[in-house]
Amino acid sequence: MAIRKIVEMGKDDILRKHARKVEKFDKRLGVLLDDMADTMYEADGVGLAAPQVGILKRCVVIDVGEGLIELINPEILWSEGEVVDAEGCLSVPGRRATVARPEKVRVHAQDRKGSHIEVEGEGLLARCLCHEIDHLDGILYVDKMIEDITDQMRDEEEGENA
Ligand code: GNR
Ligand code: NI
């Protein structure tokens, strides 16, 4: 178990590359997934994709508060609806913006042993699944963002809700 360094946008073009499909479900893959989970929790993130730690493999970890999900070679089977909501990225620190994402998605993937699995998610989980799968294709949320969320906007919203 180890914390890996998270690559930031603009410092490394690895975030812009297409990650390769995982073919070998070996011990090395298990170590990568363990390290990715440690790194995600340490950084207080709800998801992490392997390219964010400099590894061009199609691996993702997610925990939106319902337990750890590990996805190898994830693919969206179908999606429905659309929600515009706030999004951030550990590779784009200090910024948040609104992005339109499906309300609900169903994803096919493999687990660390290579078994085929399916995961369905709504709300934040759906958003996170889409965000992480985008990372595997070199896409960052800033490519899709609608508008930046400034501290001022956030304070005003908090005021309204108070
Ligand atoms: O920690 C994260 N929070 C988040 C919030 C809304 C939508 C997506 C995310 S993912 C992000 C972690 C990250 O950068 N994963 O790639
Ligand atoms: Ni991200």
Image (tube, rainbow, N blue to C red):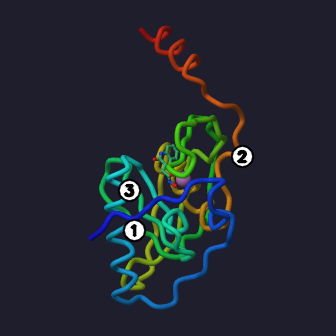
Q: Position of residue 124 (x, y in %)?
A: 48, 44
Q: Position of residue 78 (x, y in %)?
A: 62, 61
Cβ–Cβ under 8 Å for marks 2 and 1: no
The relative height of residue 5 versus residue 20 in the rendered view (above or below) is above
The relative height of residue 63 versus residue 31 in the rendered view (above or below) is above
Which residue, given by chain and number where applicable, does mark 1 sit on? 70
In this view of the protein, which residue sits in the foreground, 125 or 148?
148
| Mark 2 neighbour class, 10 Å CA radius: few under 14, some 14 to 19, many 20 or more | few
Mark 1 residue's CB less than 8 Å from ligand 1 = no
- Foreground disc of the pair 2, 3: 3
Q: Secondary structure at mark 2?
A: loop
Sequence-wise first label, 2 or 3: 3
The disc labelled 3 sits on which kind of residue?
Met
Q: Secondary structure at mark 3?
A: helix
Which residue, given by chain and number where applicable, does mark 2 sit on? 144
| Corner quadrant of residue 40 | bottom left
Which residue, given by chain and number where applicable, does mark 3 sit on? 40
- Foreground disc of the pair 3, 1: 3
The disc labelled 2 sits on which kind of residue?
Lys
Placement of the C terminus among the 4 image quadrants: top left
The disc labelled 1 sits on which kind of residue?
Glu
In this view of the protein, which residue sits in the foreground, 32 or 98?
32
Structural distance between the alpha carbons of marks 2 and 1: 25 Å
What residue is shown at x 47% (from left), y 66% (from top)? 60
Q: Position of residue 152 (x, y in %)?
A: 57, 16
Structural distance between the alpha carbons of marks 3 and 1: 12 Å
Q: Position of residue 65 (x, y in %)?
A: 32, 47
